[in-house]
């Protein structure tokens, strides 16, 4: 099988490119959230290169599947996947967080093609995705809506209102992925405001629940690409914050830590 017709190999290749490119953006800007970029990148590469129906030449194509990046701080992951998907040229990435750049610290749909909705303040992506999915259900449209939230983000009550609404309305066209890296800003989720048992909570709100290794491309492809059912689907993706760089993995300080020259070089050696 060649890279072109082996979907898992293609996703793997894209994810590696995204990690390298996102880390370079953070290094150049000396700003960013690389820990959360790296926990999300395998999920996002799988969605864009294995599941989503979209056309970068027509970002407003009415029938496109929607992806909403609710954890809007992880712009290293979002901007690299949108670039790899063809929404804008690679040299735009070099402007990350520079004055007058379209690639702000948090994504802005008014500037950047492919961004479905502005995020950054946590707790907004799922409510917006739920509204979009309701519109799709009412109009009998065929598109699916995917939303990726953090796990610390779930401390925002707005998520639980949206979860209740989606469950009550049987929004089978809605898929919610939780990046379950067990860390938020500066601490663990369970020592801050415990989320468990997350699967039982989602099920009680009327959702189908699936657990997956959030770095296993083949497993991700299977659960994300599965045919929608009657109920909305929650995918709890078990991930590692900082995944792919040994000195960053599971370290809270890499939430918004930025590399010095030695750390950048060491990371590039590992990301091959
Ligand atoms: C409403 C709101 N409060 C606080 C913040 C600041 N903030 C940015 S990221 C973050 C932690 C998020 O943790 P998590 O959702 O687990 O994201 P991940 O671990 O995937 O980076 C916080 C508190 C914010 N962006 N929005
Ligand atoms: Mg987290």
Image (cartoon, helix red, strand yellow):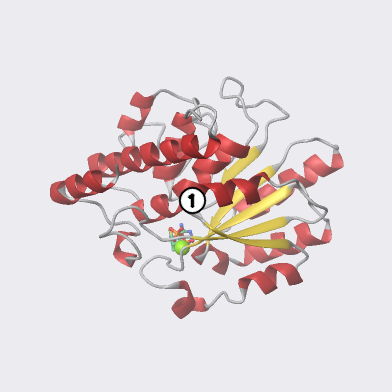
The outermost residue toward the top is 57
In what element is the residue under mark 1?
A: loop
Q: Is residue 100 visible?
A: no
Q: Position of residue 183 (x, y in %)?
A: 42, 67
Q: Position of residue 44 (x, y in %)?
A: 51, 44
Residue at 43% x, 36% y: name it. 14
Q: Residues within 10 Å of mark 1 (few under 14, many from 20)?
A: some
Q: Position of residue 54 (x, y in %)?
A: 62, 29
Q: Is residue 269 visible?
A: yes
Q: Is residue 102 left or right of residue 56?
A: left
Tell me if the residue at label 1 has its CB under 8 Å from ligand 1.
Answer: yes
Residue 80 position by quadrant: top left
Q: Quadrant of ligand 1?
A: bottom left
Q: Is residue 127 left or right of residue 94?
A: right
The outermost residue toward the left is 262
Tell how many labels.
Answer: 1
Q: Quadrant of the C terminus?
A: top left
Label 1: which residue?
120
Q: Position of residue 83 (x, y in %)?
A: 44, 30
Residue 52 position by quadrant: top right
In the rendered image, the vertical position of residue 17 relative to residue 35, given as above or below: above
In the rendered image, the vertical position of residue 61 relative to residue 20, given as above or below: above
Nearer to us in this view, 146 or 186: 146
């Amino acid at each position: 099988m060649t890279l072109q017709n082996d979907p898992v190999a293609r996703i793997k290749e894209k994810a590696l490119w995204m990690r390298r490119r996102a880390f370079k953006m953070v290094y150049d800007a000396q700003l960013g959230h690389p820990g959360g970029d790296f926990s999300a990148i395998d999920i996002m590469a799988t969605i864009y290169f294995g599941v989503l129906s979209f056309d970068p030449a027509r970002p407003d194509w009415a029938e496109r599947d929607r992806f909403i990046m609710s954890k809007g701080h992880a712009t290293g992951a979002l901007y690299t996947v949108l670039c790899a998907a063809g929404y804008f040229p690679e040299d735009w990435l070099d402007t990350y967080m520079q004055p007058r750049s379209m690639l702000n610290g948090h994504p802005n749909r008014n500037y950047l093609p492919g961004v479905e909705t502005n995020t950054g303040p946590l707790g907004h992506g799922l409510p917006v995705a739920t509204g979009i999915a309701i519109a799709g259900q009412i109009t009998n449209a065929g598109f699916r809506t995917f939303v990726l939230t953090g796990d610390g983000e779930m401390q925002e009550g707005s998520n639980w209102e949206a979860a209740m609404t989606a469950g009550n309305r049987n929004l089978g066209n809605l898929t919610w992925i939780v990046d379950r890296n067990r860390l938020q800003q500066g601490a663990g989720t369970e020592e801050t405001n415990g989320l468990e048992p997350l699967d039982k909570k989602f099920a009680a709100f009327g959702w189908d629940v699936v657990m997956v290794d959030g770095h296993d491309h083949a497993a991700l492809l299977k659960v994300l690409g599965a045919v929608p059912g009657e109920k909305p689907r929650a995918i709890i993706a078990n991930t590692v914050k900082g995944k792919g760089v040994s000195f960053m993995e599971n370290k809270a300080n890499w939430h918004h830590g930025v590399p010095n020259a030695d750390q950048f070089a060491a990371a590039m050696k590992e990301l091959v």
